[in-house]
Amino acid sequence: MTRTITSIEDLRLIAKRRVPRMFYDYADSGSWTESTYRANSDDFQAIKLRQRIAVDMTNRTLASTMVGQPVAMPVALAPTGLAGMQHADGEILAARAAAKAGVPFTLSTMSICSIEDVAEHTDQPFWFQLYVMRDRAFIDRLIDRAKAAGCSALVLTLDLQILGQRHKDIRNSLSTPPKPTLANLVNLATKPRWCWNMLQTRRRHFGNIHGHVEGVADMSSLSSWTATQFDPRLSWDDVKRFQDRWGGKLILKGILDPEDAENAARTGADAIVVSNHGGRQLDGAMSSINALPSIVAAVGSKVEVLMDGGIRSGQDVIKALALGAHGVFIGRAFLYGLGAMGEQGVSLSLDIIRRELDTTMALCGLRDVKDVDRRILAAVCGCQSARADTHPRDFGSFSCGDGPVATVAGAATAAPPIIGSPHAEALGQSR
């Protein structure tokens, strides 16, 4: 029976059936109890929108820019490790889909397809994401390879100095390619489409690392090397060094705290990404959407603020824009499409988000995505509905007739609602 696909959730369910368990779980999980992973998406639901009527909704546009690059909508594909294990040649397919949709694609350091693979098989520049590793000579070569491939921006991830524990990866004995254990062989036997596609490609290792690291000759030594390479000594001086070597557009990813945002802005980076690594690092950290307003308030006038984490719809995109993000990254949303249907699935995931964003913007009374701001937000509490305060330093705050000021997405106020009150519950603060 053919399934009608109407949402990212539909793609997720198909991907869960088609992708081997260890790789599906790798994408669709967080660290420890996964509380931050869940909060990333759940906290969007607390943000309510103002529906407008009798306004002109014709001639709408989603066109915008991200780090000065024209985009068809303010959405980029996030760097995701092992995308080439969700579907054979996954990074190449995702890059092609992104180019067709007019949005940026970001290749992860921990990709299956290499920088050169993606550059050879696509006709649009892409962004490259860099992890900081102890082997600085290798990192220098990676930066040089990205420059040679024509990458148009470097996304430097700062929140992976050490790995958060991800229980599912441990239980599944995650490896690439999969280890031939009995459990893995039994699971692979139920995924014939995935297995057939993987047999057609030579790309089954970490393409940016395999063959590019001295002393690493096989997958066993590669795994050992990778496990010890993330550098806990990372400092802002290192950021400056990489910035100087790169010499192009720089995006700093993994910012959750206003103080860190201030430090990042002082580097002169072109953008920062409010992100908790998809809930895969510090379990119990604030969701990205809750962290966004205070960071925009702190540095929004100094540096372009992007965000990722929990976005599963065009409505999530517009809520992030309303709270001050200049654009967003999507990770799992496109990975579900990739695992479900390859390049076609990534294109479908982007089209779903585009249509949802366009329709939601219209119903909020706007025609240009660049006009989206806090005016489209509404809070619903026990006493009344209220419109977002437009004070530039008071993101997402609302006046409530019963006295205290209620908030959306964790914005700080002098009189926060009491936990457990109707005001707090309506705005998701009873978590």
Image (cartoon, helix red, strand yellow):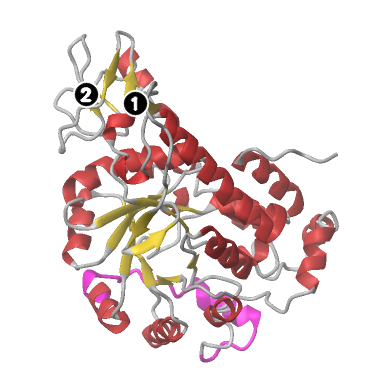
Q: Are marks 1 and 2 in contact (CB under 8 Å)?
A: yes
Q: Nearer the viewer, residue 153 or 195?
A: 153
Q: Earlier in the sequence, mark 1 or mark 2?
A: 2
Instruction: Judge whether residue 397 is colored magenta.
Output: no
Q: Which residue is mark 2?
A: 416
Quarter of the rendering occupied by the C terminus = top left
The image quadrant that residue 255 belongs to is bottom left
Query: Can you tell which mark lies on residue 429?
Result: 1
Q: Secondary structure at mark 2?
A: loop
Query: Where's residue 353, x and y in %?
Result: 53, 44
Estimate the x, y position of residue 128 in percent, counting from the top left.
44, 72
Q: Residues within 10 Å of mark 2 (few under 14, many from 20)?
A: some
Q: Choose between 391 and 155: the one closer to the eye.
A: 391
- Under tag 1, what secondary structure? loop
Q: Is residue 306 above or below residue 406?
A: below
The residue at the point 19 percent across, 16 percent down is 404
Left/right placement of residue 178 relative to residue 288 reads right
Q: Position of residue 391 (x, y in %)?
A: 15, 33
Q: Is residue 168 left or right of residue 387?
A: right
Q: Is residue 218 left or right of residue 359?
A: right
Q: Which residues are magenta?
A: 214-238
In magenta stretch: residue 232: yes
Residue located at (24% from left, 47% from top) = 295
Q: Is residue 27 above or below residue 411?
A: below
